[in-house]
Amino acid sequence: MDKNNKNSMRITTTLLKTFGALVLLIAFSCNLDETQTVAEFKNIVLSDEFDTDDFIDSDIWTFDIGNGTNGWGNNEEQFYTKRTENVSVQNGILIIKALKEDYSGFDYTSSKILTKGLKEQAYGRFEARIQLPTGQGMWPAFWLLGANCGDGTADTEVWPNCGEIDIMEYRGQEPTVVHGSVHGPGYAAGNAITKTYALENDRFDTGFHVFGIEWTPEYINYYVDDVLYNQITRAQVEEKGTWVFDQPFYIIINLAVGGNFIGAPNEETVFPQTMLIDYVRVYNK
């Protein structure tokens, strides 16, 4: 991609006015008379443009390795590695690649990177420009997890009490649809608070799109490109459970294979599959 074009892409809040302004919620799946409050975040505090062909920046990212307990709790089928076969930076793009191969007793490999313990923040705008894979069993995600997630000991909380914000989740067999959700105590897994966004006359696997949230103490707004398609408010969450989004969260980007949300690959699923990340940016006010 042309670096000048890449550097000229700024956050979509240039379309927005000051904090507290109202804008029309224009996603086709929502009522056209619905309005939402939006916040303006302009101060960039994290930017990884993946502009060098070196390995990923260890000051920002670390790895989850393995398959976790019961497929990271989702019955996923991949083994995550930090091998260059599964994660690399080339020509200004971070590439996460899912392979079908026999590895450590698993049939698939992929990668999962995260900013845990390195870059954590409460509130702000989090966005990434991504091209997604396609095919049954492909489950890419760009999401946030509470920094206090753990086993419930030593000042940690077990999931979902620590909170999860899914900026983008996607089923590879539905290449026009993405999901934006929150999970927490009283609204987790199949009971998550969620909404989908669908492209018209386009697909998420044929080009890059910007996925983002604007997160404040009172709401989380969800965006695809220039479209605000969902708002989840504190009041909405507290009708179901506890709002747990007043603490720092860290970023996760991964490409899972199989699992409860997506189902297993089938004979029509082509490997390798790639998730391409052009940049990741975080802003505050």
Image (cartoon, rainbow, N blue to C red):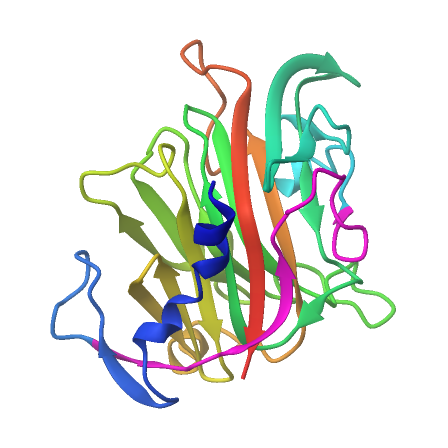
The extreme top residue here reads: 267
Q: Main secondary structure of the magenta part?
A: loop
Q: x, y (%) of residue 41?
A: 48, 79
Q: Quadrant of the C terminus?
A: bottom right
Q: Nearer the viewer, residue 221 or 212?
A: 212
Q: Is residue 85 above or below residue 36?
A: above
> What residue sits 70% from the left and 51% below the top?
114
The magenta segment: 35-62
User: Does residue 192 appear in this view?
Assistant: no
Is residue 201 shown above or below 31? above
Q: Nearer the viewer, residue 184 or 170?
A: 170
Residue 196 x %, y %: 31, 52
Residue sitting farthest toward the front: 4
43 or 223, which is in the foreground? Answer: 43
Q: What residue is rendered at 64% in x and 42% in y?
A: 73
Q: Residue at x 55, y 52 (%)?
A: 279
Q: In the image, 100: left or right of 120?
A: left
Q: Position of residue 24 (x, y in %)?
A: 20, 75
Residue 40 shown in magenta:
yes
Evaluate whether residue 81 shows in this view: yes
Whether residue 213 is in magenta: the answer is no
